[in-house]
Image (cartoon, rainbow, N blue to C red):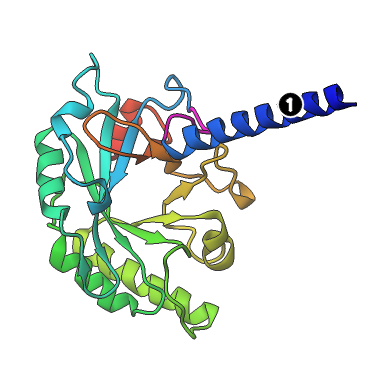
Amino acid sequence: MNVLRRWWWLILMLMVAVATSFYCAFQWGFLRFNYPDQAVYPVQGLDVSHHQGEIDWQAINAQADQPKYRFVFIKATEGGDFKDPRFVRNWESAKNAGFKVGAYHFYRNCKSGREQAQNFIDSVPKQTDSLPPVIDLEFMGNCENDLTTAQLQAEIRSMAVALEQHYQQKPIFYVTQDYYAMYLQQGFEEYPLWYRDIFQRPKIAAGRPWLFWQYSHRGRVNGIDGVVDLNTFNGSVADFEARF
């Protein structure tokens, strides 16, 4: 009986050790659920903010014959008045390193759409060779509000319309599955989607297409200390260059 009990303890400890190893590998960015086939999704990219700290943009693709990462979305603003302290440096450095750049705004549910649009417009240059502006719509880290669904949708549309009028490009909506299902499934079909799913390829209700896919939030990339979000464009290199 004692021998059997020892074996059970050994098996249990081994299972715990394996589970801990997998958890740590995932948390530190050495293991992820999605590995998009580059033959199918050849246009890969990143999104960054001040959380990535100082980035060596020249080092990201330095070891590849062809650039693995072609585009980057850079956080510019949040809510009505926050401006990412590293946006200007990241924007200029990424462009100088040959990346196609775009900017994103973290949408605050408790601020008006017009106010948030102005914050973004005041911060992001109007450049015709840039990717369209992005409105980041998610619950994580957001603020509470007393708006009805219709009121919140109206505020989101107000921001989207203001950005389109200024930049002459239709904004992209970055969405999580739950936020999309609650607020955006109806009435925003004209806006391209950047869809977050770190477990599988996006499967959006009614077969709606996606333009970009954030497939990992803990990638490892040369030139960046720590983890970074990984993304892909839904199309070929020719498709990407023709569209942007």
Tell me where the magenta segment starts and ends, as one range.
Answer: 29-35
In this rendering, the answer to whether 204 lies above or below 32 is below
Residue 114 shows in this picture: yes
Q: Foreground: 154 or 78?
A: 78
In this rendering, the answer to whether 126 lies above or below 112 is above
In the picture of the structure, the residue carrying the numbered disc 1 is: 11
Residue at image location 62% in from the left, 52% down from the top: 205
Q: Residues within 10 Å of mark 1 (few under 14, many from 20)?
A: few
Q: Say whether residue 31 is magenta.
A: yes
Residue at image location 34% in from the left, 79% down from the top: 111
Q: Position of residue 1 (x, y in %)?
A: 90, 26
Residue at image location 18% in from the left, 66% down from the top: 121
Q: Quadrant of residue 234?
A: top left
Q: Position of residue 212 (x, y in %)?
A: 41, 42
Q: Quadrant of the C terminus?
A: top left
Residue 98 shows in this picture: no
The prevailing secondary structure element of the residues shown in magenta is loop
Q: Foreground: 103 or 61?
A: 61
